[in-house]
Every structure is written in structure tokens, then in C-alpha cells.
Image (cartoon, rainbow, N blue to C red):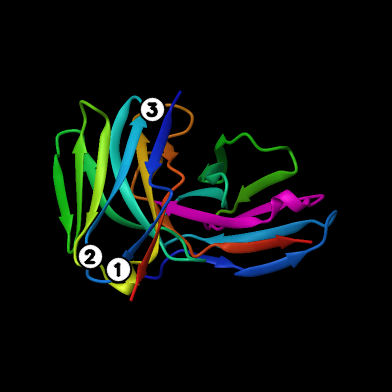
């Protein structure tokens, strides 16, 4: 069964601290993996995209890692800011099949002053 | 280039009524997908359209329907609304049939009372 599981479900951190969000997937055939940031009441916005051969990719203070062997990805946020408060959704894209996008249920991050 | 737009942004309906939501994709994008997002279930795929043809449909009852027009704009309709239909409905557009670069709109928040 194609599934994406994210942990933790929710997280509270102090402004300026770092955090890491986890994503485990059992999706095949794998095409790529994306992390999205979704502010409350808004649509998701893509942060990073990683293909099978990529281990690390950064976008400002966001760094995503991918281990295709263990089917795990992480999103590391450095020096968190209040504006980082949002839901972070891991999405795995399949090459073929009925449903090409498999969504995780997200991690809700709250950055506290 | 303007992003994906969805109207209305907020909607309140009562049980048994029907509702139509609209999505205008990014100019040049011919594919549109619709998703339902609820706190417990995360993002659930509804349907996908390309060039006015429905290509895929998710596991939703027949009360959920959609269509795409020749200008790529899309509408989705929900008839005989139920309380459980309360959700954020997201539309995403992309260029071709197999592009994974999906851009999400801001969503329509539907509340059924």
C-alpha cells in the first residue's frame, strides 16, 4: 500500500531554535519527493523537490535529506522564525499509476516567541 | 504570471444544499486537480482533468463531480451536502499531463451546518 507517514504530528519550538521533521514512505514506483509548507487557510507551497539520486537539498533555512534505501526523508529548519509556523507536508510522486501523488498528513509546527 | 485562483474563498452552506467551486489555473496550464483537505484525513485526491477530460477520480461518492472548460478553468460540484463535507478544497494546476510541478491555489473553505 502506498503510504506516507510523518512525525511528529505537531511540534512547538522557541524562536531561533532548530528542528527536524520526519517523513517515511512506502510508495512505488518512486519519482520524487517534495516538502510543502502550508500556512493556515492557504494552499501548500513547494519548498524542495528531491529525486532518487539526491541526498540533500537546501532552500534558505530549509534543508531536506533523502535516503532512498530506507525510504526516509527529513526537513531541517535552522534558526526558526515566527513565520515558520505552518503545516509541513511531505508528498511522494509516483511515476505511474492511478494516483500519482501520495500525501502525508503533515506536521504542524508552532514557533513560539 | 498570476497564480491559481479559487472562488469563493469561504462558503457556508446547510445540509442538503449543493455547492459549486471554481478554479482558474495558471495561464498555459492545461491540467487541474482537486483535493479535499480535512484535519483528520489530510489531503485527499478528488479528480484530475486535462483538456476538458477527466483523467482520474478519487474514492469519493457520486455527489462529488467536476468539469473542465475549454479555457482550462474547472469547477467542482457537491450535491446534497453533508456535515462531513466541511473542508478546505484545493485546486492545483500544471502544464501537461505528466508534469509533477503542481501549483496550488489558496483553497475554498466550505463549512456545512
Q: Which residues are magenta?
A: B71-95
- On residue A96, the disc is 3
Q: Which residue is mark 1?
A: A14
Q: CA distance from mark 1 to mark 2?
A: 6 Å
Chain letter for mark 1, please: A
Q: CA distance from mark 1 to mark 3?
A: 41 Å
Q: Is residue A82 magenta?
A: no
Name the one closer to the observer, B29 or A43.
Answer: A43
Q: Mark 3 or mark 2: which is in front?
A: 2
Answer yes or no: is residue A100 visible: yes
Image check: A96 left or right of A52?
A: right
- On residue B60, the disc is none
The image position of residue B96, as x and y in percent, is: 38, 45
Q: Is residue A66 above or below residue A27?
A: below
The image position of residue A91, as x and y in percent, is: 37, 43
* Local secondary structure at mark 2: loop
Amino acid at each position: 500500500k502506498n503510504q506516507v507517514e510523518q512525525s511528529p504530528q505537531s511540534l512547538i519550538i522557541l524562536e531561533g531554535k532548530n528542528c527536524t521533521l520526519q517523513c517515511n514512505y512506502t510508495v512505488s514506483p518512486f519519482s520524487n519527493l517534495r516538502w510543502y509548507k502550508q500556512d493556515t487557510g492557504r494552499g501548500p507551497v513547494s519548498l524542495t523537490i528531491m529525486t532518487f539520486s539526491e541526498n540533500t537539498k537546501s532552500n534558505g533555512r530549509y534543508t531536506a535529506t533523502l535516503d532512498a534505501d530506507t525510504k526516509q526523508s527529513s526537513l531541517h529548519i535552522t534558526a526558526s522564525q515566527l513565520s515558520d509556523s505552518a503545516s509541513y507536508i511531505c508528498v511522494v510522486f509516483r511515476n505511474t499509476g492511478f494516483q500519482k501523488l501520495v500525501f502525508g498528513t503533515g506536521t504542524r509546527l508552532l514557533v513560539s516567541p | 504570471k498570476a497564480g491559481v485562483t479559487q472562488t469563493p474563498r469561504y462558503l457556508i452552506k446547510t445540509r442538503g444544499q449543493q455547492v459549486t467551486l471554481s478554479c482558474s489555473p495558471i495561464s498555459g496550464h492545461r491540467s487541474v486537480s482537486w483535493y479535499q483537505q480535512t484535519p483528520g484525513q489530510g489531503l485527499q485526491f478528488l479528480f484530475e482533468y486535462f483538456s476538458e477530460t477527466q483523467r482520474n477520480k478519487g474514492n469519493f461518492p457520486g455527489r462529488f463531480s467536476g468539469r473542465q472548460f475549454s479555457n482550462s478553468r474547472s469547477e467542482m460540484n457537491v450535491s446534497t451536502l453533508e456535515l462531513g463535507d466541511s473542508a478546505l478544497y484545493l485546486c492545483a494546476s500544471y502544464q501537461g499531463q505528466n508534469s509533477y510541478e503542481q501549483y496550488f491555489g489558496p483553497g475554498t473553505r466550505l463549512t456545512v451546518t
